[in-house]
Amino acid sequence: MPVYQTEVKAGNERLTINVEADPRLRSSARWTLRNNVVTLRVPRQMTRSQIDQLIQDIAPRIARQRQRAHRQADVSLFDRAQLLNDTYFDGELHWHTIRWVKNMRNRLGSCTTGGTTDGDIRISEKIRGWPEYVVDYILAHEICHRKYPNHSDEFWNYLARYPHVEKALGFIEGVAYAQGSDPGEMLD
């Protein structure tokens, strides 16, 4: 089956669906979402009507999750991240939502890649009272994961555009030392 592309509305968003035949798949499809583009991999024998039905099943699921994330988003945190993006990363990074969360015990932030929560960034409530340059570092760290999902050399070189990386890492290491924890676990 040839690759084709279509667009669907998912809540307030438009999604581009790229359909690809995958010879490794036998009976079920797999999909990922990244920057409002769904890559839908399907078995070769799947018919166009089956694919269309699959798309109609996926779109509402994505819409529900993304609308939920928007309701929980923190506009001031989003604006703060956008200012960092514009100032240090040429405005080239894009994410879906950013919010404070209470349930992070060890990590300071996280960023999802793929799935219905693609581009949703969560920042631990426990750092709200930390120095501004540290909170900004955590925001910069997480938004940089939108370009580099892992902690590769390219990621660290890109993040180094934020001028307070070393100072912020020193603060985080100090907090980890005082708590008797590993600073590396806080930043994964």
Image (cartoon, helix red, strand yellow):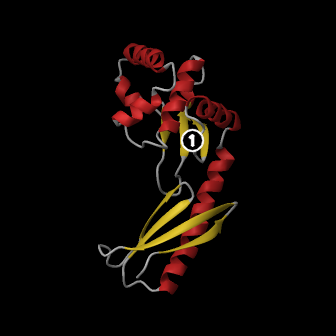
Query: Does residue 96 show up?
Result: yes
In the foreground, 165 or 66: 165
Residue 145, percent across and down? 46, 40
User: Which residue appears at 48% of the width and 57% of the height?
Assistant: 115
- Give the labeled residue for mark 1: 92
Q: In the displayed structure, does residue 7 sit left or right of residue 178?
A: right
Image position of 33 (left or right of 9): left
Residue plotted at (43% across, 80% down): 2
Residue 40 horizontal/vertical position (percent): 46, 69
From the viewer's perspective, is residue 24 above or below residue 133? below
Depicted 164 relative to depicted 11: above or below: above
- The N terminus lies in quadrant: bottom left
- Up the image or down, 158 lies above or below 172; here it is below
Element under label 1? Answer: loop
Asked if one can make out residue 107 in the rendered structure from this viewpoint, the answer is no
Q: Nearer the viewer, residue 120 or 34?
A: 34
**Amino acid on which disc 1 is placed:** Glu
Image quarter of the C terminus = top left
Residue lying farthest to the front in this orientation = 90
Circle count: 1
Image quadrant in which you'd find residue 123: top right
Name the residue located 53 percent from the left edge and 21 percent from the top edge. 134
Q: Position of residue 17 (x, y in %)?
A: 53, 68
Residue 182 spot, x, y in % from top left: 34, 23
Is 112 positioned to the left or the right of 56 in the image? left
Tell me if mark 1 has few (under 14), some (14-19) or many (20+) residues whose alpha carbon lies within 10 angstroms of its own: few
